[in-house]
Image: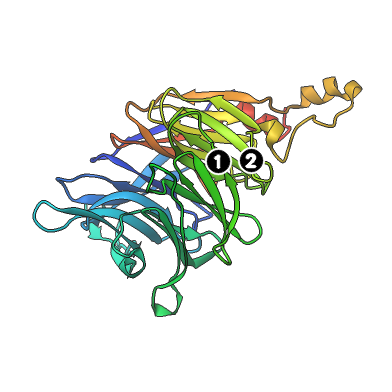
Amino acid sequence: MREEHSLIHGLELQGRALTAVTGDADNVAFLVGTQSLRHTNMVYRVVMDEESNQLAKRAFKHSLGEVWHIDSCPDNPAVFTSTFGEKSGVGGWRKRAAVMALPEVVGDSEEDQVEVEVKTELDSVLGGGEVSSVTFQPNDSSKVVCLVGDKAVLADLGGGEVKQVWSVTHSVRGQTRVETGRFNPHRNCHQYSTACGSQVIGWDCRTGEQSWIIMNTTQQGNIRTMDFNPNKQYYLCTGGDDGMVSIWDTRSPTEPLYTHRQHSHWVWGVRYNTFHDQLLLSAGSDSRVVLSSMASLSSEPYGALVEQEEEQQDSEMGGLEDGVIQVWADHEDSVYTAEWSTADPWIFGSLSYDGRLVIGHVPRAVKFRILNLV
């Protein structure tokens, strides 16, 4: 069985911001932002041609500053949020955020680099604090959540004016910064979770009230990333400084359902596969990208209710066991982001700090077992 090899592309500058283009269901596309203090930063739109297995790249100037975080608009492939650092005064530096758009470009030359367009500045809802990320609400692109210091702010972009809907504060002793946040995709994205230190809180998006709390998610250090299971609304995956990947049931948050040390250093990214939630992707500053199977805690727990006399027959058909499926060691620096493609459930992208973008594939044997084709 012929395996599909990873595609590796080196950017001209270092970077840590990567997102799948969620508004484009026809193409395997990613947006990548660079992070340089000396050179003009860029936003790249990278598209994979699945027939030729080649990458096409279009570069846009991001002259406002280095890109720390980027998020794609759920219904417009040209629009995205950018959280960036810019020079401020003599020797000064600050973080800002804005909703931006990629301008239409005529021609195919990669040399014709035009500036990204700023659609909406978000300074009015940031309150002068240090913003770490701005994320679109998946079911409503007129709303974004801004993480600013120890606060999460839901803002409404509709009506031509940015308005704050609610603001919540999440801080624990010794920590004054919300590290990451994530929408729960279920029930019209009615929940948003924030992580501060080793604590995770779920908030009701309609009122800003606290819904649940997980007190101690790591053995040591902070939570750096999390993601909700797209098919099981109460399951949350977290990763942090202890190198552990853990799965929690937010209805019973005292102990994790699963925990395993997937990385030898900090975990910076965990993502459930949008279609097949037994597939879990993680990335860390040990330069590794790990694909794991969490079949027993997925919406397709293969063989969980199978009668004993049927087990042999069904095991011949396929199914996955829990554990590591494959480890990618194509990176040589910290991998801060790994994201599944929204157009093809078997393809993902990962970005390391040295600017190396890797497009990987789920192994064919695993794909066929999930689809019961073997």
Give the amino acid type for the residue marked by disc 2 in the picture.
Pro
Is residue 253 shown above or below 92? above
Disc number placed over residue 250 in the picture, else none: none
Q: Residues within 10 Å of mark 1 (few under 14, many from 20)?
A: some
Earlier residue among tags 2 and 1: 1
Helix, strand or loop at mark 2? loop
Helix, strand or loop at mark 1? loop
Q: Residues within 10 Å of mark 2 (few under 14, many from 20)?
A: some
Instruction: Classify the position of the N terminus by image quarter.
Output: top right
Q: Please give the name of the residue rendered at 68% of the width and 25% of the height, measured from the top-left corner.
A: 321
Depth check: give the residue in front, 22 or 266: 266
Q: Is residue 236 left or right of residue 111?
A: right
Q: Is residue 25 left or right of residue 43?
A: right
Give the amino acid type for the residue marked by disc 1 in the picture.
Met
In this rendering, does residue 321 appear at all? Answer: yes
Q: Please give the name of the residue rendered at 64% of the width and 34% of the height, measured from the top-left corner.
A: 255
- Tags 2 and 1 in contact by the CB under 8 Å rule? yes
Q: Which residue is mark 2?
A: 253
Depth check: give the residue in front, 219 or 75: 219
Q: Position of residue 347 (x, y in %)?
A: 52, 39
Total labels: the figure holds: 2
- The residues bearing labels 2 and 1 have C-alpha atoms spaced at a distance of 8 Å
Q: Please give the name of the residue rendered at 28% of the width and 62% of the height, measured from the top-left corner.
A: 128
Q: Which residue is mark 1?
A: 215
